[in-house]
Image: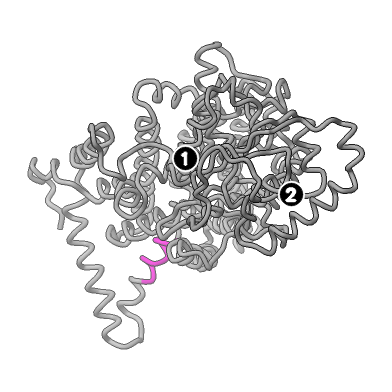
Amino acid sequence: MANPNPSPLLRLLPSLTDAAFLLPVIIIYGRLQGAKLLLGDGDTGWHIRTGDWILANGRVPRHDIFSYTKEGAPWFAWEWLWDVIFARLHQWGGLAAVVLGSLLVLCFTFALLYRLVRRHCSNDLLAFVITALAAAGSSLHWLARPHLFTLLFVVLFLHILDRVREGRTRLLWLLPALTILWVNLHGGFFVGIFLVGCYAGGRIFSWLLDPDRAAAPLALRDARPYVYTALGCLAVSFLNPYSYNLHLHIWNYLRDPFLFQHVQEFQPTSFQHPGAYYYGPVLLLGVLAAAWSARERRFEQTLLLSAWIWLGLYAVRNVPIAMLVCAPAVTGMLDSWLGWLKQAQVASWWNHTGAAFQELSAEFSALDRPWRLHLASAAVFLAAGLLHYLPAPPEKFIAHYDPKRYPEKALTALGEPAQAGRIFTHDEWGDYLIYKLYPRLRVFVDGRSDMYGEAFNRQFLNVMNVKPGWRETLVRHRVDTVLLPVDSPLTGALKETTFWRVSYDDGMAIVFRRTGSPPEAQLARTATASAHFDLGAAAQADRQHCPPSAPRGEQVSVPSHSEGREDHGGRAAARINSNRDPKITNLNRRSEPTCCGTF
């Protein structure tokens, strides 16, 4: 039995809440690549530069500011508030501050998730185990980007909705206020409206299925506050710099089939990936919990689980939210099963094991549940933060873009931006160039696939994949410098033409300079030959895992280190991928670090 007056020293000791708060720190710096994990996506760079632009100009951009191919095109900087906050952090503390800010959001997310899960069961140890499993399963999309706030807001909404279900209806007023913040931090704000809608739908299902028809109207009455709240959240979501135009833009963006065919984050979830050892069991238990919730007549939970398990399977970027939604219901179901196991007609060792685990958890909970000052978790987080700013920090605490994935050395070869000219590179490296060289340099393409649109993105992929018309696209945009991974199919094609020469090659990145702009008349006369060359180069790239070697007469200004190199194609790749083309097997595949490797 818990002591009603625990020792004051107990307030200073760490608790499972502290441990849950530190789960991202433990996973990122203990199991994964450290700060490089959170900086594993070039999008972070252009978000920071967008925030710099907003701080300098006092308004949000409405047209493209980063490219020379779409200059002046309409653009929605829909995460502008995140951009401003983290641009300011970057000004104060560099990329280390951006990493720590993102890490803090993750820490609060899983501390709150643990407290939510604990409300659904009496077994604190079980609650922590499921929270840890959900954290590990969601780590495949831990990046220093605005979507981390969506994970935090999902947990906040679930907390509030859980309390409202217990009768604290007035808490619903908090949800529209949170939506105002959410819509300006990340485009995932509609997830909150969907969560409220599921609770309304659950009460409607109760009204439809309740065998006691005299009590059924009460369920329909209980649905009304959720419906009004969902409508209120939708109404206040228009309080953003783009008003309803943002909603139309997101709607059209998410209906674009090109997005789901070519953007890596929107590909279906793979259970052959090592990370499936974490998210796979949670999703499987979630299916069982959906059925269990229906049996317990908790239809709102059944709707939530069914929807997010399906969405998690449909697109890999939805897996983290599916983990957050599944964790409370899965824990409640397992806790119920443990209670049943003590009296079940099974082998006695099962009964003894279930009883012993529950007794152990009850004793532990008596010590763990009294409130704490949480000084331990704060101290560990601060210590981790200070390690980033040491003169010689440990490898995992160095906050910079991984030079094995990004062309850091090649920037020197490019020279001053004015000398670099109009650079072509893939979208992931375009993000990196924006971070490093904006506003002195504009890029051909970057990670803002919604702004560039399907037609332009197809042209970009045709160039990367050496498909017919690739040379005309480069000429049309007056490209005079090309920066590529050394094993890109386009690298081999450029080595075969006399219009380009290699000016830099470090074994990971290669820089080409145009030797002379071919006249339009010459392009017209050689159109047929160009088409044959395009097909031949593409076929050659298919037959080889790495591009053809430079011809003997090729002009190279620096020694080439391409031969005998490690294959970087899967690591230095763009997020717009050509996986759907069977001819391309290793182009433009972005690495997503997870607990067990890369995705």
Q: Amino acid at mark 2?
A: Val
**Relative to 384, does residue 264 appear above or below in the rendering?**
below
Q: Amino acid at mark 1?
A: Leu
**Residue at image x 55%, y 11%?**
57
- Is 406 left or right of 473, judged from the image as shown? left
Res. 46 visible in picture = yes
Looking at the image, is mark 1 or mark 2 nearer the viewer? Answer: 2
Report x, y in % for residue 67: 66, 26
Which colour scheme appears in the figure? one colour
Query: Residue 548 falls in which quadrant of the image?
Result: bottom right
Span of residues in magenta: 330-337
Is residue 335 a member of the stretch shown in magenta? yes
Quickly name the residue at label 2: 466
Quickly name the residue at label 1: 148
**Residue at image x 64%, y 50%?**
552
Query: Who is closer to the viewer here, 493 or 582?
Result: 493
**Relative to 160, does residue 329 appear above or below in the rendering?**
below
Between marks 1 and 2, how big is the CA–CA gap?
36 Å
Query: Who is closer to the viewer here, 415 or 573?
Result: 415
Is residue 286 a member of the stretch shown in magenta? no
Report x, y in % for residue 556: 58, 40
- Is 572 left or right of 473, judged from the image as shown? left
Q: Dot 2: few (<14), some (14–19), or many (≥20) neighbours within 10 Å?
A: many
